[in-house]
Image: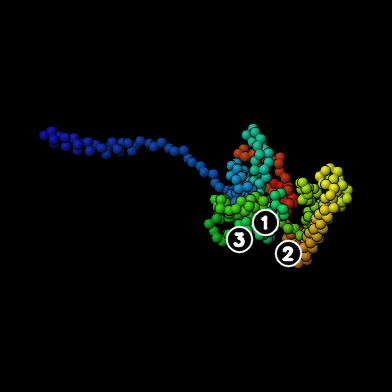
Amino acid sequence: MAAKGTKRRAKHEDAAEPKQSKKRSTKPKPSKPDEYFEDKRNLEDLWKQTFPVGTEWDQLDSVYQYKWDFSNLENAFEEGGVLHEKKVYLFGCTEPQLVWFNDESKVVCIPVVVAVVSPFPPSDKIGINSVQREAEEIIPMKQMKMDWVPYIPLEHRESQVDRLKSQIFILSCTQRRAALKHLKLDRVKKYEYCLPYFYQPFKEDELEQSTEVQIIFPGEPKPIFCEFDWELDELEEFTDKLIEEEELSEDQKDAFKEFVKEKVREAKKANREARETRKKAIEEMSEEAKAAFENMRFYKFYPIQSPNAPDVSNVKSPFINRYYGKAHEVL
């Protein structure tokens, strides 16, 4: 009997179980607070997509440690903006500056974006220059795995058609950081000395106008470093002064003078060839290309002030680099 009673109780408990679960289900569940996600702006990642040319590889992470605000660049493409409905080529660079942030001053790599308004790419070349290198190199940018590629706004990123219709092009680099360890040091350093190259045939280059030559004379017991201006300096006096200052010995005087004369001849020849090259380029240029060069505009964008990044308003400069010169407008 006890066994039967046990079974009945078990049945009774089993039967009661659904009622208990039903009661639990009637209790109101606590409501979760509504979650809001900020919509991504259409050109939000534009400044990050432009490769910061000439930045040291080990400094790249420090560039992106702050939430820089380039909404001024985004707004420039809106109606009324300086880049609205224009064909634009963008490249990035960085400028190390001493700035104030979070109650302390520190040197920060400030990202900068240069916008070139042009109907065609401003150049397909890169300049490589540094104090350590004897002479600058002008090489095709593809040798450094760089190229102009179309930028597609976020809302059109899935469309191949919009890629073909793009009016925004960015200078991109496909060199992977992870692969740098397999490259020779000189090759890695080349990236740090890169400058976006631009040749303006309607404007005299600094070298064409310069009358100075850099002198590195292999003297004894040490080399002689100096600058000689063939319009302002008189060679005999210049040499005598070096001897007087004990930079040059008397027995090396004639050799030094011949060395300087040769460097002056080389510089004058280079200036003459540069002028002839520029003249020839203009003569062979179509009227459309001439108009494009004359109407080309450079805009230099700095990040605007925001609570999440250093204020750079006091360190802005119109200078881009030695090839581009100064921007028409700094924003």
Sequence-wise first label, 2 or 1: 1
Judge depth for marks 1 and 3 and give the one in front. Answer: 1
For badge 3, the amino acid type reads: Lys
Residue 206, quarter of picture: bottom right
Whether residue 121 is situated above or below residue 43 in the rendered picture: below
Which one is in front, 63 or 153? 63
Please state if 45 lies on the left or on the right of 320 as rendered: left
Name the spot of residue 78 as percent of width and height, x first: 64, 51
Helix, strand or loop for disc 2: helix
Name the spot of residue 286 as percent of width and height, x first: 74, 66
Give the residue pinned by disc 1: 126
Helix, strand or loop for disc 1: strand
Judge depth for marks 2 and 1 and give the one in front. Answer: 1
Judge depth for marks 2 and 3 and give the one in front. Answer: 2
Task: Name the residue rendered at 41%, 36% in the picture.
Answer: 30
Q: Is residue 42 visible?
A: no
Please state if 185 lies on the left or on the right of 216 as rendered: left
Give the residue pinned by disc 2: 288
Name the spot of residue 272 as percent of width and height, x first: 81, 60
Q: Quadrant of the N terminus?
A: top left
Name the spot of residue 17 as percent of width and height, x first: 25, 37
For badge 2, the amino acid type reads: Glu
Tally of marks: 3
Give the residue pinned by disc 3: 165
Q: Is residue 144 visible?
A: yes
Using the numbered discs, state the Cα–Cα distance from disc 2 to disc 1 in whole angstroms: 24 Å
Q: Residues within 10 Å of mark 1 (few under 14, many from 20)?
A: many
Sequence-wise first label, 1 or 3: 1
Sequence-wise first label, 2 or 3: 3
Task: Name the residue rendered at 67%, 38% in the picture.
Answer: 99
Residue 108, quarter of picture: top right
Q: Residues within 10 Å of mark 2 (few under 14, many from 20)?
A: few
